[in-house]
Amino acid sequence: MEYVRASSVDEALSAAESGAAFVSGGTNLVPDVLYGRNRAQRVVDISRLSELRFIESNDDGIRIGALATVTDLLGSDLIRREATPLYESAAEFAGPLVRNRATVAGNLMDASPAADLAPPLLALDGEAELVSAVGRRTLPLCDFFVDYRKTGVWPGELVTAISVRPLGEGDKAAYHKLQLRRAMAISVVSVAVALRMDGETCAEAGIALGAVSAVPYRAEAAEEALRGRVVGEAEIDAAADAARESASPIDDVRASADYRRKMCGVLVRRLLREALGLPEAVRA
């Protein structure tokens, strides 16, 4: 394997023209190479590109540099206040050593169905900013994940930042990662919800699910059950049912497909009630 350390974005793009894997934290790529799951012939190290490590707010929303780490997310008051589900997912992400190395873009580029940061970024209308030798483009995260471990990023393209729409005053949000233990565990099911409120009415909804399909995704039918409505018990039940029906999980060592599908409905119902400040439902 050929190793190239880039000192600029242009140098990284030039080194990747003939095909290469970009690496920074390496928390996904290194194990994949060691266990034969990735056979990249060239690796371009972008870890020293400080211009890609930032968290900022502008007129278009919140921008998170590709090399911002999970620890950076936890240290950001902006993320805690205005991208709450992302902050909460960062708090559940692996352990301190991994959080110090793992980057936001790296977690997305791995394209795992259980990628921890994917559901909150999807629910917050996330977009990936991409650059290549031929120009720049923006790719909505709802189109970013195309299949199991496959993304819509073209060969030679580099993710430079992720932008999200911040939560406004009165907006509601919540996140939960169902896992077998509280540290260093891959999610069994993960759910993020973000409700854009107009008074008592849910003007827009973002509901994203992880680990229950080949890719993390927005549960569009569940969102439609809430959009334009004053959300009460009927709307919450409809959204939960739609989320459950949208899932296409697998059986594995962590959980059965039936359990995962059921928990999609349970968690969406629970998080919507939590986000809206409703008491937990008591069911016979």
Image (spheres, rainbow, N blue to C red):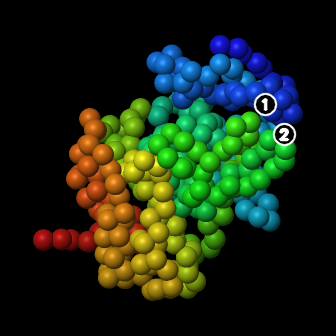
Q: In which quarter of the image is residue 267?
A: bottom left
Is the residue under label 2 in contact with that under label 1 (CB below 8 Å)?
yes
Identify which residue is drawn at 44% across, 65% down: 219
Tell me the quarter of the picture where residue 68 sits: top right
- The answer to which of 170 and 206 lies nearer the viewer is 206
Mark number, residue 195: none
Mark 1 and mark 2: Cα distance apart in space: 8 Å
Horizontal side, residue 67 vs residue 146: left or right: right
The C terminus: image quadrant: bottom left
The kind of secondary structure element at disc 1 is loop
Q: Quadrant of the N terminus?
A: top right
Near-viewer residue (182 or 148): 148
Q: Mark 1 points at which residue?
A: 17
| Image location (x, y in percent) of residue 280 | 29, 69
Residue 27 drawn above or below residue 180: above
- Residue located 46% across and 72% down the image: 223
Give above or below for 126 relative to 31: below
**Residue 180 as seen in the image, left or right of residue 163:** left
Which residue is labeled 2 in the image? 133
**In this orientation, does residue 123 appear?**
yes
First-in-chain label (1 vs 2):
1
Amino acid on which disc 1 is placed: Glu
Q: Which amino acid does label 2 sit on?
A: Ala
Q: In this view, does 235 lie to the left or right of 108?
A: left
Q: Can residue 270 be seen in this view?
A: no
